[in-house]
Amino acid sequence: MAHIVYQNEAVVEETDLTLSLLDVSHKNGIPHMNACGGHARCSTCRVLVLEHLDNVCPRNEAERQLAERRGFTDDIRLACQSRVDGDVIIRRLVVDTYDRDCVNCETPMAVGRESCVAVLFVDIRGFTPFTERTLPYDVVHILNRFFHTVGDAVLDNGGVIDKYIGDAVMALFGLNGSDARTTCLQAIKAALQMRASLVEFNSYLGRVFNEQFAIGIGIHFGTAVVGEIGHPASRQVTAIGSTVNVASRIEAESKNLGTDLLVSEFVLANVGDCVETGRSCTTTLRGTSGETRLVEILGLSGDSAGDGDASVHAK
Ligand code: FES
C-alpha cells in the first residue's frame, strides 16, 4: 500500500500499485486533467513530486521524450505514465479555476483527438481593395452571400465549416472517420463546386455591384488535433496543427502559381486516379521544413466525374 498525498487536495491510500497516478486520481474522484487521454501526448496530467521521488517508477520512453521536449526537471512527472511503489507527496500542476471549468465541461471533443483530415482554405482575391471602394453594409451582404455559396459546397460534400477568417473560410473533411481517399475526394469536390458556383455568384455581383471575384483554394491532408476550443460557455470544434498551417499556405501559394485550386502531394496521393492535374511546383512553405510538391487540380477525371456524387454525401 502507498499513501499518496495530493498537496492541498487529498490523501489517498492506494493498494493497487499497478495503477498510474492518473488512474489513482480518477479512482478517487480527483479531477485530474488528461487532455490526450493518458497517452503521453500532452502535459496536462503532470505533477510535481514534492517528496519521495525515489518511490516513483523511472520514466518510460514516451515520457522521457516528452519531458526532454518540454524541458521538465526530474521531479515533474506525467501522472498517466507514473506508478509508485511507496508513499509520495505530489502536487498537480494544471489545476486552477479555469482548469476545473475545463474538466467540468469535458466531452470527447473538448479534450481533442488526433484525426486524419483534409483541410481546405478558400479566400477572395483582392478583397481588401474591394472593401475600400464598397459601402460597409454592401460588404457584409456580399460576404454573407459568398460564405453561403462556398459553405454550401462544403456541406454538400460531407465537410464541416470550421471558421471564417476575414474573407477566408476554413473547412474540414474526414471528421466522420471516412478513409483518406473519400476524405480527399470530398474536399476536392467541394473545391470544384465552389469554382463552378462562382460563375453564378459573379453574375449576381456583376449585375448588382459591377464587381467580379476571383478565389484561391488550397487543400492539404494530414493529421491534426480536432477538439472544442474556446471559453467553456462558447466553444467550437476546430483543428489545430501543422496540417492546418500548411493548407493555409498552399492557398496563399495558389496565387503565385496563377491557379484557383492547388493541393499538396499528400492529397494527390489519395486521389491521383480521380483527378486531372495541371501545373505543379515544389516549394518550401513558410513555417515548414523540407519541400512540398503542390499540384493544380483542373477537374475530375471522366469516371470520377460521373460517379462521384454518390460517394460524397457522407453527412
Ligand atoms: S494525459 Fe496527456 S500526457 Fe498524461
Image (cartoon, rainbow, N blue to C red):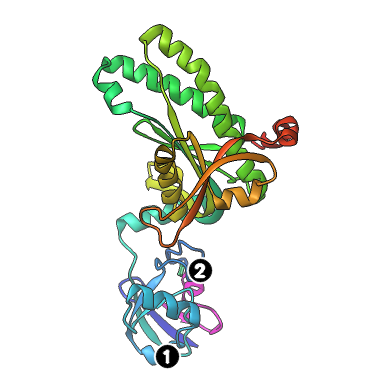
Residue that protrudes farthest toward the left in the picture: 132
Residue 62 coordinates in the image, percent (x, y): 49, 77
Q: Which disc number belongs to residue 55?
A: 1
Magenta residues, start to end: 10-26
Which residue, given by chain and number where applicable, does mark 2 sit on? 38
Q: Confirm if mark 1 falls within 8 A of ligand 1.
A: no
The answer to whether one can see residue 107 in this image is no
Name the amino acid type tagged 1: Asn
Give me the C-alpha separation between circle 2 and circle 1: 21 Å
Tell me, yes or no, whether the highlighted magenta stretch contains residue 21: yes
- Asked if disc 2 and disc 1 are in contact, CB closer than 8 Å, the reply is no
Classify 10 Å Cα crowding around label 1: few (below 14), some (14-19), many (20 and above). some
Report if the beta carbon of the residue with label 2 is closer than 8 angstroms to ligand 1.
yes
Relative image position of residue 265 (x, y in whole percent) = 55, 51
Q: Looking at the rendering, which quadrant does residue 314 occupy?
A: top right
Q: Quadrant of residue 5?
A: bottom left
Q: Is residue 235 above or below residue 223?
A: above
Dot 2 alpha-carbon crowd within 10 angstroms: few under 14, some 14 to 19, many 20 or more: some
Q: Is 40 part of what is drawn in magenta?
A: no
The quarter in which the C terminus is drawn is top right
User: Of circles 2 and 1, which is in front?
Assistant: 2
